[in-house]
Amino acid sequence: MSKIKIVTDSTAYITKEYAERENVAIVPLNYVFGDEVGKEPFPGQFNEFYEKLKNTKLFPSTSQPSAGDFYEAFKKAFEEGYESIIAILLSSKISGTYNSAVLAKNMLDNKRIVIIDSLNAAANLKFLVEEAVNMSKNGHTIEEIENHLENMKKNMHVYFTVETLEYLSRGGRLSAVQATVGNILNIKPIIELRDGELKLLEKVRGKNKAISTIIEKVPENVKRIGICHVLDEEYAEKMKLTLQEKFPQALISVDEIGPVIGSHLGPKGIGVCFF
């Protein structure tokens, strides 16, 4: 049986415990926040960042891992005795992470490295990683895993909304005037990740309406749902109860969103990833 190393980036928001237990390598994205320079941490370690975000008018900038970061991760895996590597990464249409990994593969000139552009993020990226881990443990080849994940990612969907438009404005996605007017009118955008790109799907009035509209997007034959949130576990757990009642056959998890994606949503941003 081929020994396959699974690599992903920090926007899969996989717990440290899972990564250590399953020997998944996490290559973190970076952020600069005022005078603070850091690497995106694991779930359970986001609160300090978001408290700072809430209490300052500064807005963080983020960047992909360097090719050198991936080079070191790949080199280490081969040194540990892995025969091949499969890296499953954040959508190339919203980050240069995938391109950094391709550069690292070329630096190593190694055909035993497969790099997958997930065209996804957050829980959907996590689901792809978990699938790869399970298939590897069950003796599947790297080619079988690659083909399966390429098909699986085509049936994935992401929808989310925000508590306030302030952070979309701070991040340059909206003008200050649009954000102010939208907040006064209690406008909630429903944003979709489609074909790897973020797109505004529609606008509705009120958070409850936004959430019910998102839930209506989930099909009857859904297999897995990740409720992704920024500091809003209480609301996420309520959503989980609603979704469990509607989709009793689905496996549903509640997942934290970290700084790289969560900065743009702001505290209490929430959404669903599913396939």
Image (cartoon, rainbow, N blue to C red):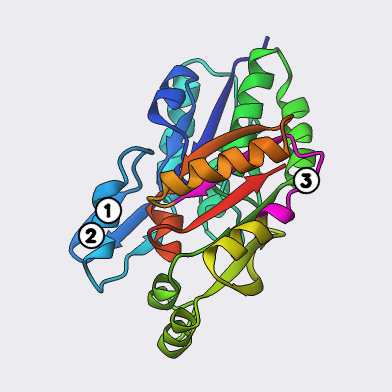
Q: How many marks?
A: 3
Q: Position of residue 49 (x, y in %)?
A: 27, 53
User: In this rendering, does residue 87 appear at all?
Assistant: no
Tell me the CA gap for discs 2 and 3.
36 Å
Residue behind mark 2: 52
The answer to whether 16 appears left or right of 132 in the picture is left
Q: Position of residue 32 (x, y in %)?
A: 29, 61
Residue farthest to the bottom?
A: 177
Q: Residue at left 34%, top 37%?
A: 44
| Residue 223 on the magenta segment | yes
Magenta part of the chain? 215-229
Q: Regarding mark 1 in the picture, which secondary structure is present there?
A: helix
Where, quadrant-wise, is the C terminus in this rendering? top right
Residue behind mark 3: 155
The answer to whether 265 appears left or right of 122 in the picture is left
Q: Which image quadrant for residue 64?
A: bottom left
Q: Residue at left 28%, top 47%?
A: 47
The answer to whether 59 appears left or right of 157 in the picture is left
Q: Residue at left 41%, top 85%?
A: 180
Mark 2 / mark 3, whichever is N-terminal: 2
Q: Position of residue 155 (x, y in %)?
A: 78, 46
| Residue 62 on the magenta segment | no
Which amino acid, by three-letter code, is at mark 2?
Lys
- State whether residue 213 is above or below residue 181: above
